[in-house]
Amino acid sequence: MKTRTLYRCTSCGQSSPKWMGRCPACGEWETFVEEVQERGTPSRTVSAAGIQAVALPDVNADQAPRKRTGINELDRVLGGGLVPGSIVLLGGDPGMGKSTLTLQLAANLGTTAGTALYVTGEESLHQIKQRADRLGLSASGVAVASETSIERIGALIAQTSPALVIVDSIQTMVTEQLESSAGSVAQVRECTALLTKIAKSSGIPTILIGHVTKDGLLAGPKVLEHMVDAVLQFEGDGMYSYRVLRALKNRYGSTNEIGVFDMLSTGLAEVANPSEVLLSNRRAGEPGTAVVAVTEGTRPLLVEVQALVSPSGYATPQRVSTGYDSKRLQLILAVLEKRGGISTRQSDVFVNVAGGISIQDPALDLGMAVAIASSVRDSPIPPTMAFVGELGLTGEIRRVAHLEQRVQEAIRLGLTTIFAPSTNKSVTHHVQPAERLIDVLRSLY
C-alpha cells in the first residue's frame, strides 16, 4: 500500500498537495497540517462477511482485571487501576512531578506485574538512573530506552512485551512517514495513533506524558485528547509542595476524583488525609479567613479560604484571585454589596485558597463571601465554624450535593457549627440552616 502526503485545513477541511500559509477557502492563517494517506485500489464491492451484530443485552460486560499501581491516590483517579490496553495522557507544568510519578509507577509494576518499559525522548538514561537512585526505587523490573522514532519504539514493544509502557514525552516522538518536525500537530497525532493501535492490539497499558502551553493547557491538538482513554493533569503551585492529580477525561471511571500528593525529596508521597494537611497551618482568630467544606468527586475536603480587603490606591481597584474562579469572585462582590450591605467598590480585594490548590466546587461561594465580609469589618470568624453553600444572584444560598459527607468531615476535625443551605435536609444538630446570605452575616455580626 503506497502513501502520499496531503495538507488539510483544520478550520474548514480544505485539502492541498502542498503547504500554504493561508487557506484559500476560509482565509485562516497557519491552519494547514500534514496528513499521510494510503493509496491503493479500492474494492468496488464491500462485503459484510465476518461481521456480526450482537444484541446489546447479549454483550459480555465482564471487565478485564485492572492493574493496581501500588499508588492508592493514582488508583483513585484512574477508577481503580490501569485498564489493559488503555492510553493515559498525563500533563502538567514543568516541575509538577510527572516524570517522578511515572517512574515510581514503573518501579511498582516492574516488581509485581512484569517489566515496565520507560521510553524517554528528552533525558538520557544516566539522568533516569540518577532519579531512580535519588528516589530510592528498586528499579530491577524497569527497562529504559532513549529513542524518538515511533517505529523503533513499536518494534521494541513487540520484542519485549512489557507490562506497562511510559513515553516521556509524546511531543518528542516522530514518525518516518511525515517530514514535519517533532512536536507538530501532525507528528503528535500520528505517533499517538500508532501507540494506540499497539496498546489496543497487545493489551499493554500505555502512559503518554504531554507538555503544556503557557496557559497551563495540554499542548497539541484537541484531537489528541479524543484519541486517548484518560487525561490526567497535575495541578499545584510550584512554591508549595502539594500536588493535585485531576482526571479531565476518563472512559473507565469518574472525572470528578482527585489524588493529593506531597512532593518530597524522596518523591511523591500520598496524602491520605488532605483536609488535616490543608488546615495544618491555619491560624484561628484571624480576620478574613474561613473554613469551607468542599467535595472533589467522592472525597470531602476542608479548605481554608483567605480574603484581604484594603483601600485601593488606583482608579480601578484590583481583583486578584488564587485557586478560585475570578469571575465567581466578581459575582460574590456584587452580591455582597447588593444583598449583604458590604461595599468593596473602592477597595482592592485579594482572595486565596490556602495550600496552593484550585477548587471548582461552587459550594465555596458562601465561605468566600463570609471571609471577604470578615476582612472588611476586620472581625474574625469563630474558629469552630465552617460554611457550605452556593450563592445565587438574589443572595439566596442554594442547595449543594453530598452535604452529609461534608458535615461529617467537618465534625471529625473539630468544627461544631456548619452553616449550610436550608433546602438541604440534615438531621445533624451541628448544621445551622440558612436561607440567604444576609441571614449568615447577621448571625456573625
Image: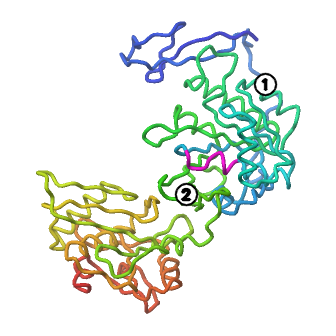
The magenta region covers 95-102
Question: Dot 1, crowdedness within 10 Å: few (<14), some or many (≥20)?
Answer: few
Instruction: Provide the secondary structure element on which disc 2 rests.
Output: strand
- Residue 336 location in percent, x, y? 21, 69
Q: Main secondary structure of the magenta part?
A: helix
**Identity of the residue drawn at 56% across and 49% down:** 96
Distance of label 1 from label 2 (alpha carbons)? 34 Å
Horizontally, residue 109 falls left or right of residue 87, namely right
Q: Where is residue 338 in the image (x, y as percent from the top left)?
A: 15, 68
Which percent across, then down, holds residue 157?
Answer: 82, 33
Looking at the image, residue 378 sits to the left or right of residue 383; the answer is: left
Q: Report the residue marked by disc 2.
A: 243
**Which quadrant of the figure has residue 346?**
bottom left
Residue at the bottom extreme, as displayed? 429
- Residue 421 position (above or below residue 35): below
Q: Which of 16 and 437 is in front in this view?
A: 437
For badge 2, the amino acid type reads Arg
Residue 380 lies, in percent from the top left, at: 29, 81
Relative to the observer, which residue lies in front, 349 or 395? 349
- Which structural element holds mark 1? helix
Is residue 188 highlighted in magenta? no
Q: Name the residue under label 1.
A: 152
